[in-house]
Amino acid sequence: MRPEVLNPLFVETEVLDGVGPKMKKPLEKLGLSRVRDVIFHLPERFVTRRAVTTLDEAGEGEQIVVALTPTEHRAASGRGPYRVLAADDAGNICTLTYFGRASYTAKKLLPPGEKRWVAGRLDRYGDMLQIVHPDHVVAQSGDTLARLSEPVYALSEGLTQPRIAGLVAQSLARLPSLPEWIEPTQLAKEGWPEWADALKLSHKNENEAARNRLAYDELLANSLALLLVRADNRARKGQPLKGDGGLRAKLQLPFPLTGAQKRSISEIEGDLQQEAPMLRLLQGDVGAGKTVVALEAMLIAVEAGAQAALLAPTEILARQHFETLRAMATPTGVQVALLTGRDKGKARQSILMGILDGSIDMVVGTHAIFQDAVNYRNLGLVVIDEQHRFGVAQRLMLSSKGKRTPHTLAMTATPIPRTLTLAQYGEMDVSRLDEMPPGRQAIDTRVVAQDRLGDVVEAVARHVASGQQAYWVCPMVRDNENDDIAAAEARYAGLHERFGEDVVLVHGQLKPDMKDAAMERFASGAAKLLVATTVIEVGVDVPASTLMVIEQAERFGLAQLHQLRGRVGRGSEKSTCLLLRGPTLSETARQRLALMRETQDGFLLAEEDLRLRGGGELLGTRQSGDTPFRLATLDQITRLLPMAHDDARLLMERDGGLTGPRGEAARILLYLFERDWGVQMLRGG
């Protein structure tokens, strides 16, 4: 149960003055549905203003507070701006400009002939000084002059800065008094304020110590939760799986294993022989041969008399894994079955019977393989593909399927910088495939200006005419998936005119069966060109596809560009990746595209991406950031996470976990940051 002391923070925002059904919508768009969310909605930056007596003292582009007297209101015809002319004490004239519905406010706030204190940014428009949408207009100077340093928050439509600031102030007034969970000596050494003070200071001004303290709290909660999961896993009874090598000896792989594959297999083999269930992450670049390692692990389980299951995030991927594993496992005589939500009737029944009586050794599928109706005779190993699509909670659900907790091998093709592996996978041991199998050719990567689009289409036409296939990935337009889809549909329409039925379209909002049908046509070679948004990023394997076009490549993160490029270069033919870039490039974008040309090492690119961005997206998902953290920036994660991880370990090993005064405080911390699945572990459920 959540500790009672936290209840004031977990109430809905409706308890705050001014929040009704209308205000709730824009707040929820920002993820602010409870008081706790509002206090953690930290300012993006602070604006610092200077109070001036006349406009002559201010510079253009400067944030100021000045006393002005409105002289005239001018409404424009049509959709033009609403302007209020106002004079300072020396008679200098300035225009206060309002757009859209804000003009109603201007009429009320700025009566002609009455002095007002105005705060905002002074700019020039033609030969006139102007302030567009002043931040504050008040009759008494005191309040505005007190706000010379003011927070600037992320907003959504229907919210204003003063409104958010007001809600934050109300929420901060509700802060309960919480016990300290940080080691006293560390708190003193870092010079960090107490928790409640840190929050108040972070909303008030640029206070590095306060922001670092809050980031550390979040990282500590995450590390502690992951360590609790790990400790719980170690305390569970699994079944030791020791294979005799009989089945593995029958494998006829087309090429020898790399050193990295051999090393990973031996690490997994060692884990499987222990009674404590394995919890291992296999990190391997696109094409580094993770599937072969997974097959070897699954065969060990089958040799030891158990069953193995492989879980994939989508039906297409499940089907693909099934075909690959079945082909590779044929010489061993092992029975492999595919189970997805689509299987119905007798076919489904016979698979379920095979899983129950043990005649099926390996099951591949989507999360359908863990539904209540699916019962295993003896599930010993679960392999999870594309680990980051499944949270810790889902992993725990899988654990409950075996009579004893099965061993878990998670795989990801998203290379993660070492610093961040702890943040995502602190509860797991990690194996890395950092060598490429022999015979893989480097992908020829080129950067092409978007204005050469016509040439690119002709190159694609020649490529398709030679019997090969190609991908065309459309840009991330904005943080709005609908815009991305519109861009993909527009490009598809143009290419369809040129290529007819040879081109298919795939995006996230297509019905699953339509998406599968399009993918099927492409995978079978019936269609030659696949136009898509980034939904194809993970795992689709079409060896005959040897050309990848990525539009507006400068809008993607390095990790994502690398993932997309990895869709080609899977056969023996030479592959090419064309990165189409827009007319203007930032310095970071330029460096990104240059790195893509220079290297195909995903781990190196992940480290470089971290260095270039310092913030923003992490796993190559949307630029907005898919780190598991709300308060900690990438820079803070890099600096503070090792410290938080060590502290969490100390708390577990020396201070007996969540008992004792500091342990009680740490329990509150876990609930505060909603990492309470860590606490649930302790209760075994």
Image: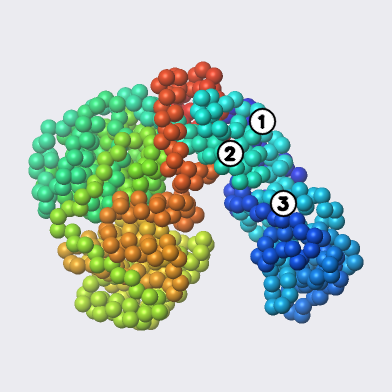
Examine the image and state in which quarter residue 532 appears. bottom left
Name the amino acid type tagged 3. Answer: Leu
Q: Position of residue 442 (x, y in %)?
A: 21, 62
In this rendering, the count of numbered labels is 3
Which residue is painted at 19% across and 62% down in the image? 441
- Distance CA(mark 2)–CA(mark 3): 20 Å
Q: Give the mark, 1 or 3, whose residue is nearer the N terminus.
A: 3
Residue neighbourhood size for the residue with mark 3, other residues' Cα within 10 Å, grouped as few (<14), some (14–19), many (≥20): some
Q: Residue at x 77, y 70 (%)?
A: 94
Q: Give me the C-alpha separation between circle 1 and circle 2.
A: 18 Å
Say which residue label 1 marks: 176
Q: From the viewer's perspective, tell me whether residue 366 is left or right of residue 40.
A: left
Asked whether the viewer can see residue 658, the reply is: yes
Residue located at (72% from left, 56% from top): 50
Q: Which mark is residue 148?
A: 3
Residue closest to the eye, 655 or 498: 655
Question: Which percent across, then down, holds residue 110?
Answer: 84, 64
Q: Is residue 38 left or right of residue 628?
A: right
Residue for badge 2: 210
Single out the residue that lies furthest toward the top.
660
Residues 542 and 453: in front is 453
Q: Are marks 1 and 2 in contact (CB under 8 Å)?
A: no
Q: Position of residue 23 (x, y in %)?
A: 70, 52
Tag 3 secondary structure: loop
Which of the two discs, 2 and 3, labels the residue nearer the N terminus? 3
Which SS class for mark 1?
loop
